[in-house]
Amino acid sequence: MKSDICMFCRGKLSKGLDNFVVKIKDHIVELAEVPAWICDKCGEAYFDDQIVNQIDKIRSEIREDNFLAHPIAAGSVSLKKNISVSE
Ligand SMILES: [Zn+2]
């Protein structure tokens, strides 16, 4: 994320956590508490390239059925051990 302005409403983005929903095979998986930039006005969430790359990696691991994350709720997995954010 190079800009800190929302591309939809031009609101200000602040650092926060959001859920990232991905479709894997026939399953909808919600990745909980993914580091994101969230618009103060409209709530749109933006994810750093670094985070998106890690999510892509996790998605392919899930496809290969060797995903080791612990489920925290139905349809949700925690990424806290998989994703770290650089300041
Ligand atoms: Zn916005």
Image (spheres, rainbow, N blue to C red):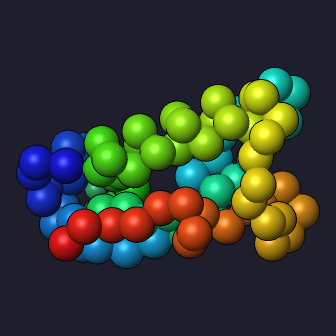
**Picture quadrant where residue 31 is located:** bottom right
26 or 13: nearer the eye? 26
How many discs appear? 0
- Quadrant of image for the C terminus: bottom left
Q: Quick check: can you spot residue 29?
A: yes
Q: Quick check: can you spot residue 38?
A: no
Residue that appears at 29% across and 73% down: 15
Left or right of 43 in this view: 63: right
Residue 85 spot, x, y in % from top left: 33, 67
Residue 59 spot, x, y in % from top left: 64, 36
Left or right of 43 in this view: 19: right
44 or 61: nearer the eye? 61
Q: Above or below — where is 66 with respect to 51?
A: above
Residue 21 spot, x, y in % from top left: 64, 47
Q: Above or below — where is 11 with respect to 60?
A: below
Left or right of 70 in this view: 61: left
Residue that appears at 32% across and 47% down: 50
Whereabouts is ligand 1, in terms of quadrant?
bottom left
Residue 37 spot, x, y in % from top left: 30, 62
